[in-house]
Amino acid sequence: MNKTFIIAEAGVNHNGSIELAKELIKKGAEAGVDAVKFQSFKADKLVTQAAQKAEYQVVNTQNDEESQYQMIKKLELDYDKHQELMDYANRLGVMFLSSAFDLDSIDLLTELGLSIFKIPSGEITNLPYLRKTAKTGKKVILSTGMSTLGEIEEALEVLKDNGAKDISILHCNTEYPTPMNDVNLLAMNAMKAAFKVEVGYSDHTLGIEVPIAAVALGATIIEKHFTLDKTMEGPDHKASLEPNELREMVASIRNIEKALGNGVKAPTNSERKNKNIARKSIVAKVPIKMGEFYTEANLDIKRPGTGISPMFWDEVIGTQANQNYEIDELIGK
C-alpha cells in the first residue's frame, strides 16, 4: 500500500502570530506528518463586513458581537510571513501547504511555488476560483464538505476543462466538531466509485479514531486540524488535536498501513511456525496391529499437524496398517 499523505491542518490556529505558526510547523514535523497546512486570505476579499460567524465560531470565540470579518482580519498572513513559514517548513523537512480563500491568494501561493493546491469545501461552487486553481497546472486536492455528488461532478469538470490533470477529492463534513452520526465515511468510497479518482478524508471529529478508520477504508490522504493548546482563544482550537494526539494519530495510521498488507491471503512468515502446532493429524485411537484395517473406531484426530492431514480421512479409512501403532501414534509416520 502507498503511504498515506497526512496533512496537519494548522489553519488559523496560529492566532496571527508568526512564532505560534512556526511552533505549529515544528510540532507537526515532530509528529511525522507529511505537510502542515495554513489558510491564505485577505479578509476584504473573503467576507462582507456584515457576514455572520458560524455557530461553532461564536461558541469557540465566546464573542457574539464580533463579525466574521473582524474575527478573520486578525488571522491574515501576508506574503513575507508565508515565505518565512515555507522556508522554515523546508528546513524541518515537512511540506508547507495553504488553502487559498480568494483569487489574490491563489496568485500568492502560485508565486510561492506550491506544488499542491488544496481547495476548501466552501469554494467548490466558486467557478472563477476553480478555473484559476486549475490553470496553475498543479496537483489539486478538493474538499467536498456540504456537497452533493452532482456538485462534486460539476467542480471536477471545471477543474479538468481548465487543465487540472492530477486531482484528489476529500470526503468532509464541515461541522466543528462533526457528530459521529454525520461522518458517513462510506461516502468516501462512493465518491471513489463515481469519479474514479484518489480519495481521502478531511476530519473535524473529536479524537483520532475516524481518520484511522478512513485509512482502513482506503483513504490515501488524511487532513486533521491541530493546535498547540485546545484552550487557546480562536474559532478552531477546540476541535483540533494537541501535539501528543497528532503524534498518536500519525503512528496509528502508519500501523494501519502495515496491517492492511498486500491483500494476498497466504501464511505469513510470523505464523508458519504455528502451523504444525495448531493443526492436527490422523493418529491411532487404540493400539493397531499391522495388516489391521483402519476404521473410525480405531483412528482419531489430534495435534500436532506433522502427520497425515485429516483432509485425507476418507482415503485412509478402509486401508490396511503397514505397521503396528500405539495409542496416539501418528498414522503413516
Image: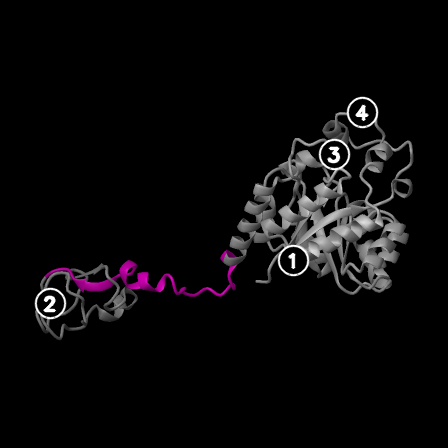
Left or right, residue 274 beside residue 95? left
Image quarter of the N terminus = bottom right
**Residue 279 sits inside the magenta stretch:** yes
In the image shown, does 148 or 25 lie closer to the viewer? 25
Q: Nearer the viewer, mark 2 or mark 1?
A: 1
How many angstroms separate mark 1 from mark 4 (CA)?
A: 40 Å
Identity, as a three-letter code, of the amino acid under mark 1: Gly
Image quarter of the C terminus = bottom left
- What residue did someone put label 1 on? 93
Element on which disc 3 rests: loop
Identity, as a three-letter code, of the amino acid under mark 3: Pro
Task: Tell me which segment is drawn in magenta.
Answer: 259-286
Residue displayed at 59% across by 39% down = 207
Identity, as a three-letter code, of the amino acid under mark 2: Tyr
How many angstroms separate mark 1 from mark 3 (CA)?
A: 28 Å
Q: Is residue 236 above or below residue 213?
A: above
- State the mark number for residue 235: 3
Q: Are marks 2 and 4 in contact (CB under 8 Å)?
A: no
Q: Residues within 10 Å of mark 1 (few under 14, many from 20)?
A: some
Q: Nearer the viewer, mark 1 or mark 4?
A: 1
Element on which disc 1 rests: loop
Q: Nearer the viewer, mark 1 or mark 3?
A: 1
How many angstroms separate mark 2 from mark 4 (CA)?
A: 88 Å
Residue 326's quadrant in the figure? bottom left
Residue displayed at 54% across by 57% down = 257
- What residue did someone put label 2 on? 325
Mark nearer the N terminus (2 vs 3): 3
In the rendering, at what x and y percent does residue 101 appear? 83, 47
